[in-house]
Amino acid sequence: TVGRSITQSLGAMNSPSSFFRSSYTLPSAQGMVQMVLSDARASSNEANPSVQDTQAGSNSAENASDSFALGDFSMQDIHGETYTQEMFADYDLTMVNVFTTWCSPCINEIPDLEQLKNEMEDQGVTVVGIALDTINSQGGADSDAVEKAKLLAETTEVTYPFLIPDAGYLNGRLAGIQAVPETFFVDKEGNIVGETYSGSRSLEEWKRIVETELNGAAQ
């Protein structure tokens, strides 16, 4: 499959679990997340729910969204372009997919997310990716992970951005993530809305979810 070939190209088969899992728990080797994020958690006014590892065939784990405004932020994508909270204003609903370059379920669903964006953009929906492993323990960009993310973007021909987390981890929103992929939704006002979804899904499953979240955001 496309996902398998991309995963092998990135060397992601060294990841801690089998290929067919729908998500990966962040291993202790990825302790940079916990190291950098301890400060982000302290500065965040909202407690983010823990995300449990989700096995294939059991993708229904959905946690209630924090339902709060993300606030002001500034992040760069893997090509150096700057994105702020203003990126949400042009769409009724933005799907934010948090992934790592070593996570095969994350990689496997990226072509589906690109197709979803292309098919639902006319309905006011877009997709943004955040590559969680592209930030290092000092809060700067990890050059090796950024290069892997560039290869992934090129191979999958995605048109939506892959963002590098800022030092504040999106005002603490990314601080509680314990497994990837994790997906949440943001309305045009910059508020997190609806549910938080742990684990990868098929294109048809994501379409149903996005339609539900889009209807909810419109109310």
Image (cartoon, grey):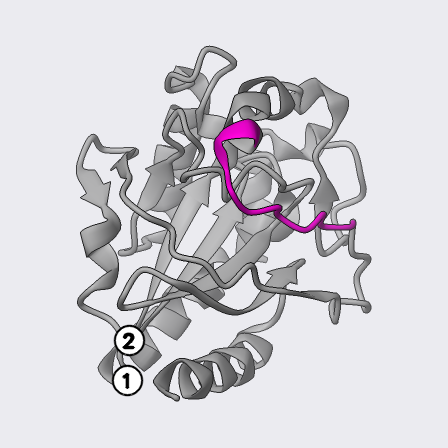
Per the image, label 2 sits on a secondary structure element best described as loop
Mark 2 and mark 1 residues within 8 Å of each other at the beta carbon: yes
Q: Quadrant of the C terminus?
A: bottom left
Q: Quadrant of the N terminus?
A: bottom right
Residue drawn where x is 22% and y is 45% of the image: 84
Dot 1 lies on which element?
helix
Where residue 51 appears, as percent x and y from the top left, is 71, 50
Q: Is residue 50 magenta?
A: yes
Q: Residue furthest front?
A: 45
State how far apart marks 2 and 1 are (Cα): 8 Å
Is there any visible trace of residue 154 in the rendered image? Answer: no
The image shows a total of numbered marks equal to 2
What residue range appears in magenta? 42-52
Image: 133 above or below 179: above
Looking at the image, which is closer to me, 81 or 152? 81
Q: Residue 92, labelled with which disc?
A: 2
Is residue 162 something that shows in the picture? yes
Residue receiving disc 1 = 123
> Is 102 on the left or on the right of 215, as rendered?
right
